[in-house]
Image (spheres, rainbow, N blue to C red):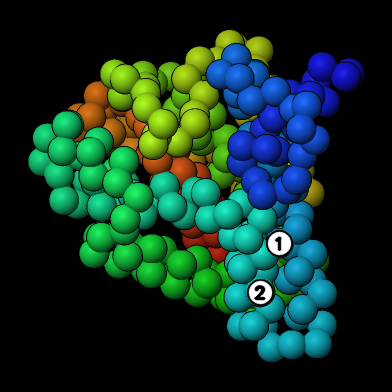
């Protein structure tokens, strides 16, 4: 139990801004093991964001409650995944060779593609959450937020398990990222990511599984075509796109079922 707690804290240290004890191991081996808890980090981030939404929507307009919940998740992760999404937009928008794409993604500056991609992604996410809150509201909308953060983090785990890491040489400017995963770790991570779907007690919600698999397969194919695999930035982009795909699916389910 102590060992698993240490592995979980490694995941907390890498994927959030939550303070951790100094003794927490941040070696590559521990990061690979910590990947099993990546969807559980989604529970933490999504739960925090959902609580902000629930508290805010009682006294503030829905639009402000949604905005505050989004800000809460961004602050808790340090925009870790949003930054990856922006880097992917810059890299694949401005590069036409593997070397150029990887070089652009490694650059800490955000270009036009990244800025526009970030703005459109956040606006899309805000609009979907506002529509979901307007459609159902209350605890159901809050649980959608929690579920989205958990299940969207299962897709990067899926990519790590099936795909190859694209960079030949790691350097100090590259984001730390797990590159290996055992079958047991993969299964545990996926189950943790899917568990929130049980709350909705509706089999239609499990259509999220094939939908998100299709999202992952498409992104895997796209990244493999251009750079031969994934990077840390690619995993961040996969999480963000999967989160939006889940919100969109939920909105459609609630409107047409």
Q: Which residue is mark 1?
A: 49
The 10 Å Cα crowd at callout 1, few under 14, some 14 to 19, many 20 or more, is many
Extreme residue in the left direction: 96
The numbered disc on residue 68 is 2
Which residue is located at x 23 percent, y 29 percent?
Answer: 227
Tell me where residue 132 appears, x and y as whole percent.
61, 70
Q: Taking the image as drawn, is residue 195 in sight?
A: no
- Foreground of the two, 169 or 45: 169
Extreme residue in the right direction: 1
- Foreground of the two, 8 or 120: 8
Tell me where residue 82 appears, x and y as whole percent.
47, 54
Which residue is located at x 58 percent, y 54 percent?
Answer: 78
Tell me where residue 158 appears, x and y as whole percent.
50, 27
- Foreground of the two, 110 or 156: 110
**Where does the C terminus fall, quadrant-wise?**
bottom right
Q: Taking the image as drawn, is residue 91 in sight?
A: yes
Q: In whole angstroms, how far apart are the C-alphas of marks 1 and 2? A: 8 Å
- Above or below for 136 versus 96: below
Q: Secondary structure at mark 2?
A: helix
Tell me where residue 219 appears, x and y as whole percent.
34, 38
């Amino acid at each position: 139990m102590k060992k698993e707690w240490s592995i979980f804290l490694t995941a907390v240290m890498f994927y959030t801004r939550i303070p951790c004890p100094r003794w927490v191991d941040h070696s590559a081996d521990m990061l690979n093991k910590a990947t099993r808890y990546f969807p559980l980090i989604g529970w933490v981030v999504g739960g925090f964001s959902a609580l902000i939404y629930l508290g805010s929507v009682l006294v503030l307009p829905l639009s402000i409650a949604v905005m505050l919940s989004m800000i809460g998740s961004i602050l808790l992760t340090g925009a870790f995944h949003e930054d990856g999404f922006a880097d992917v937009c810059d890299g694949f928008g401005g590069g036409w060779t593997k070397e150029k794409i990887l070089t652009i993604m490694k650059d800490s500056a955000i270009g036009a593609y990244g800025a526009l991609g970030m703005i459109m992604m956040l606006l899309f996410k805000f609009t979907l959450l506002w529509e979901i809150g307007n459609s159902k509201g209350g605890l159901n909308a809050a649980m959608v937020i929690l579920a989205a953060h958990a299940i969207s983090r299962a897709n990067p785990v899926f990519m790590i398990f099936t795909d190859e890491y694209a960079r030949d040489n790691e350097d100090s400017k590259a984001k730390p990222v797990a590159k290996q995963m055992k079958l047991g770790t993969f299964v545990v991570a996926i189950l943790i990511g899917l568990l929130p779907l049980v709350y909705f007690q509706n089999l239609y919600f499990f259509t999220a599984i094939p939908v998100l698999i299709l999202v992952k397969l498409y992104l895997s194919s796209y990244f493999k075509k251009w750079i031969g695999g994934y990077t840390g930035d690619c995993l961040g982009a996969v999480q963000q796109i999967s989160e939006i795909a889940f919100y969109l699916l939920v909105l459609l389910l609630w409107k047409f079922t």
